[in-house]
Image (cartoon, rainbow, N blue to C red):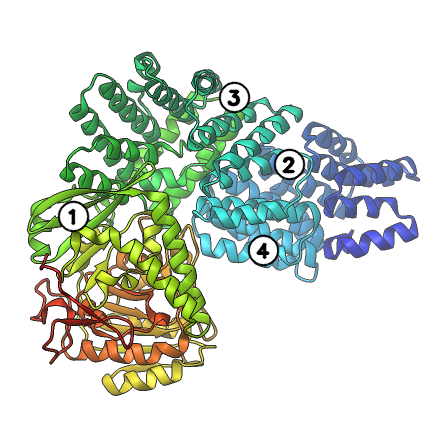
Amino acid sequence: MTAVADDPAVAYRRALRSGDDRTAGLAAKELGRPGEGRELLGRALGAAGSPYEAARVRADLAGVLAALGDVPAALEEAERARAALRGTDADRLAAVVSCVLARAGRLLEARDAAAGALPRARRSGDPVALAGLLTGLGLAQACRGEPAAAEAALAEAVEVSAGLRHQAAAARSDLAFVVARGGDVPRALALFAEAERDLVGERLDRCRFDRAEVLVGAGLAGEARELLAASGAAGAGAADRLLLLAHAELADGDPERAARTAEQARAAFTAQGRPGWTLPAEHLVLRARWAAGERSPLLLASAVATADRLERGGWEPAAAEARIIAARVALHLGRPAGHLLEQVRTARGPGALRVAAWHAIGLERLSRQDRTGALAAVWTGLALLEEHAEVFGALELRARAAGLGDDLAELGLGLARSARELLAAEERRRAIARPAAIRPPRDRGHAAALAELRTLSTEQTTATARGGHCPILAGRLARLESTVRDESLRRPGAPAPRARLDMTELAGALADRVLVEFVRIGAELHAVTMRDGLLRREHLGAYEEAARDVALLRAVLSRLASGGDDPRALGDLAETAARLDRLLTPLHGDRELVVAPAGVLHGLPWAALPSLAGRPFTVVPSAAAWLRARTARNGGGDHRVLVSGPELAHATRELRLLRRLHPGALVLTAPSARAETVREALDGACLAHIAAHGEFRPGNPLLSRLRLAGGPLLVHDLEALAEPPHVVVLSACDAGRAEAGDAVIGMAGVLLALGTATVVASVTPVRDADAPDFMHAFHTGLCAGLPTAHALAAAPRSPGVLGFLCFGSGQSRSRGDDPPHPPGGLRPGQSSPVATGLVGSATQLDHEPT
């Protein structure tokens, strides 16, 4: 069977030619055709010339039956073979049994089966048997919450499989699964990608499923959808693939398709005789119908029935979420909802249940016209959600009541009446809209607790789906949740739960600046402004109208970045920018702005708007984030770093221009600008300018990367810096881009969250040829003492660089007091009240000062 472990496709063809049904059957299973494998092995069993040969075939048949989802039959065939087999054949059977038991959840038996056979297998030196035993042992240890031991076993399995390409890749895929359980998403994804190249058939489908589950958990639902669409999982894996695909579709903003896929998953689980798994699928159908906008009496009846079934099946957080959906539909239809909420209001136990309870209390108070009490319930629930952020992120995907946070925040926005209430509600929403963690905590004890939480959550999900809901297991999970939550709050350096935004502090910090924070409430777009300490609320119209114009403007700028200044494109640019400028109608004037976008506005190239031409402004994830950025510590050093990456035609000229302005800067160019070298150079820098292509990862900007010589620099790797660079300039990619709805603004937002005060980056593609002169003008302003936002506003722009924005504090140094600067972003020595717009044009600032 060594040939199958190396290349099952080649082994299959040769076995068919030679009439070797046993080898062909085993290879067919590895190629993803377990039904054919069973048929071929059945023929081989009938043709076996001796009881010993029949036992060898039965050992292979056990693995094929397990792939078909028939674990009892697989174990029966293994037992019939066990007494006859000796030596290497017995070791290979033990490996099959261990893997079957591990995947069936019989973890102690799986561990014992592998551990008992390992000493003999090590002596015999058969790589197929040894790798199989180590894999079974590693999977059992991983599922038992022993990540270090599991990783060691699977790493050894990869090592002993060297030379057996297919088996080594399968072991590497299982190692990736264990690494993901430990919380190291980048390493897991790299291992999955490496394994996928050499896998085929059933193992390739399983690898893609595990990888897709990691992607969905990390917020990369769009990538997971593509991966699952390419997977043709059959047999026992088909229903699981459909359920995960439905999760990905819903997370990717496609609820109609998610509802259809979840219905298919429910039918597939029913056909497979797995009724316990039909309930999570039914719950997902309900969530998708709600997300798609359905508010019908039929949905109300479905929600009530689904909640009852979920509760009877032991899916308590999901049942609570279903009752909340039912109550919201009832309130929409003008029907009483108190009886639907009563069971949720008194819920105790895991954090998700308590968040649901506060949601229910808020809805119940709202139904009695107690708006103040309802808003207080929302605040309490959101605070609880934030405290348990790490806990909820570690819960098994299918067990999460994933819509609770978004729905609770949406309720808060709907309850807000005054500008102050709306700003407070939106700031709370943004505080919980953070990307999923992609690395385990540095504290080993805390990392181990999170890994154990993932294991327990999966164990409880599996037990519940099998109809064996265990109160003892649920109690352990609740206690571990509390432990993780307490540790995350006590851990040195851990961020404390964010207090409510202090409006007085905000007004004082703004001084003569003006804040505008955009808010989406349903289909409408609103804005809250703060000017001279006074708050105002503005209704700006339909959100979709703004979304269409943003998409059009981005498309036009992408065209202009890749070609010349086409007159028709320039006309489209001016027309679309003028329409979008109405978003700032209440703010015309020359005061500096602090802009907190919402939804698709995160991707708006604000500098293209006429009223912002030459006007200093900074873009922030939230008002609270701006306050934090203003107090970010400088690294204490004065060193500057200039970096260029590969395959960037104009980077050499750009850095040559900047070296004249920063003669003492450390300059790193390809090939010396390697990821580790650059990361070390950035530590404590007061200014870092990086001209390198970037790759933005929608869904989780923590996984975005900058392309450097010798490999990429992952943005999240900068977390290890003792002092992040104070000002970062990314001059060659749309690194400021973010997906709609995310409160973190792409790479820029991650850098701000890690402690950088100010980031300059583009939200649209950059015309590389225009970047050097634009960056030279911008850095000239910095060297003249202008704050970052003012230096950027003063630099003349062509259409190819209109996407560059200032993110964060907008300052150039760490002190909260800005240096004196000319108003309106005027360049030093400029005396007329004219601000530069596109190159060769000027915009008269003839509005009354704001």
| Sequence order check, earlier mark of 3 and 4 | 4
Q: Is residue 79 left or right of residue 638?
A: right
Identify which amino acid the numbered label 1 is placed on. Answer: Thr
User: Are the two marked residues, 3 and 1, in contact with CB atoms closer than 8 angstroms?
Assistant: no
2 vs 4, front mark: 2
Pointer 2 or 4: first along the chain: 4
Q: Mark 2 highlights which residue?
A: 238
> Is 633 situated above or below 628?
below
Q: Residue at x 53, y 36 (%)?
A: 257
Tag on residue 477?
none
Instruction: Look at mark 1 in the image and give the residue it sits on.
Output: 529
Depth check, front residue: 693 or 169: 693
Q: Quick one: label 3, few (<14), some, or many (20+) residues within 10 Å? A: some
Q: Write down the residue under mark 3.
A: 468
The spot of residue 644 in percent (x, y) is: 38, 78
The first of marks 4 and 1 along the sequence is 4
The residues bearing labels 3 and 4 have C-alpha atoms spaced at a distance of: 35 Å
**Spatial CA span between label 2 and label 4:** 31 Å
- Identify which amino acid the numbered label 4 is placed on: Glu
Tell me the quarter of the picture where residue 652 sits: bottom left
- State left or right for residue 750 relative to residue 510: right
In the image, residue 812 sits, relative to residue 155, either above or below, namely below
